[in-house]
Image: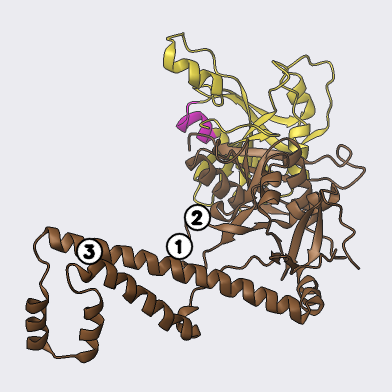
Chain colours: A yellow, B brown
Amino acid sequence: MAPDHEPHLLNLRSVVRSNLQYQHYWTDLTLLDTLADIHSNDDGDNAQLENLPWPMIYGRPPDQLYDPEHAASNASGTNPKPTPELEYVLPVHLDEKFTLRKWAAVFDALPKPCEDADSKKRIVVAVVSGDSTVVYYIMHDGIVKPRQN
Amino acid sequence: MAASTSESQLCISHVAGRYLIFDVNAVAKLRSPWHMCGTLFGTLPQAQQQNVFHGLPMELMPEEAALLVENGVAVIEDDTRAHADAVQALSEADKAAILAARTQEQDKLAQANLEESKKRKQIAIENAKASGKWKTRAARQASAEASKPDAEAESLFAAADDDNAGESAGGDGATSSTNNAVSDDSAHRQYIVPLATASIGACSLRVPQVSSHVPDPPASRYSVYKHLHSLGYYMSPGLRFGCEFVAYPGDPLRFHSHFLVKTAEWDEEVGIMDLVGGGRLGTGVKKAWMMGGRPDEGEDGNGDVRVFSVEWGGFG
């Protein structure tokens, strides 16, 4: 279906997509425009044509992005590297301003991670600046203790 | 309007818009069941430059004061009025008693100081004798005359001069100097005696006054503070990390902090640069940056506080 997000947001997303693909070697990149795009990844039953609050990207990083457990076990064991989890990426421009309401809406559109009760929703915020530098930040929905602490 | 405060309630003094605790027992109580550490900022009267370890009073954040008052744990006391009333309530007899108590303290300090210096002098003499640098009276007189015949200096030296006379004469000299000092009050009582302002002897210097003032921190800050506090976090002021609170998962003596907390109104615009700066700084010091606030009542999940934790992605 035709995405009807604003063109500048789609443009921003294509910058981030290229950056992820060619500079950071992400794979399985798909573009997410509607709620249907997200939920079809799970079962496809509750397809909705409603737009996401923000166009996003879904993809697989070369290494597991956030895994405190793994960091601990990596030191001791020599297990084969598990397949990294897929991540939701939200492209934003450095000059934008977000309200808490907007952040909440972004998270509310995402499916619950159902592995265990403790795990929180997570997105990767891709911040694009005017010189096309892209920086990436992990954002959790709720209180998640820092990785190194 | 005498105190309607029950004994168990803590007293928060409201001084020039700050919330201060002057009672060490209250400090302990706040730390243990209430996990509030506050900020100690009291210095010693005679070592104002010593600022590594501060003591009482302890300053509370408005959020902490608000939470304590809300829970009935503490009352806000109007410090200005408490002092004014206490001074008015003081009788002449009380004043005399307070001055007497102070004089007594000062005399005690002066006496202790005198004995200390006497002891030091004695040790110095012993050391000098042991090392053979101790001059006999004749030798000293010769050298004193050679340099500058000073009658006053001689009479001073004469007191603790001779080998044998040293002990006894030293005692006499001390007594006479004490007498001199006692006759001159200003020289003798120069010691600063830290007086507790709550009470001196039997005289209470405070007439507790429950203030009508209610701590009123900004709603977004207070809601986030309360939320994290209810989850067992210890919060301290965030100036050091450019945020509003630093949140510790337990007592700051045992844990490093986990979060640099920024709060905002639900519809307040926060620039992405704040997220980048906070996230990068936080990750650099092994913490996460946290942004939180509370939706207005009746929308977005019944007004529950919502927070987001941000860390650097590790790439880019």
User: Mark 3 to mark 1: distance in Å?
Assistant: 30 Å
User: Against B80, is B278 above or below?
Assistant: above
Left or right relative to B239: residue B113: left
Task: Report x, y in % for residue B258.
Answer: 59, 38
Circle 3 residues within 10 Å: few <14, some 14–19, many ≥20: few
Q: Is disc 1 in contact with disc 2, using a CB cutoff of under 8 Å?
A: yes
Q: Which residue is mark 2?
A: B53
Say if residue B215 shows up in the picture.
Answer: no
Left or right relative to B38: residue B207: right
In the image, which is nearer the foreground, mark 3 or mark 1?
Answer: 3
Chain bearing mark 3: B
Count of all numbered marks drawn on residues in the image: 3
- Which residue is at 53% across, 52% downward? A130
Task: Report x, y in % for residue B179.
Answer: 43, 80
Q: Secondary structure at mark 3?
A: helix
- Whether residue B301 is in magenta: the answer is no
Please tell me the numbered disc located at residue B124.
3
Circle 1 residues within 10 Å: few <14, some 14–19, many ≥20: few
Q: Amino acid at mark 2?
A: Phe
Front residue of B120/A37: it is: B120
* Location of the N terminus of chain B (image quadrant): bottom right
Say which quarter of the image contains residue B269.
Answer: bottom right
Have a look at marks 1 and 2 and say if they share a chain: yes
Say if residue A17 shows up in the picture.
Answer: yes
The magenta region covers: A18-25
Front residue of B235/B80: it is: B80
Q: Which residue is mark 1?
A: B50
Q: Is disc 3 in contact with disc 2, using a CB cutoff of under 8 Å?
A: no
User: Against A43, is A18 above or below?
Assistant: below
Front residue of A37/B8: it is: B8
Q: Is disc 3 in contact with disc 1, using a CB cutoff of under 8 Å?
A: no
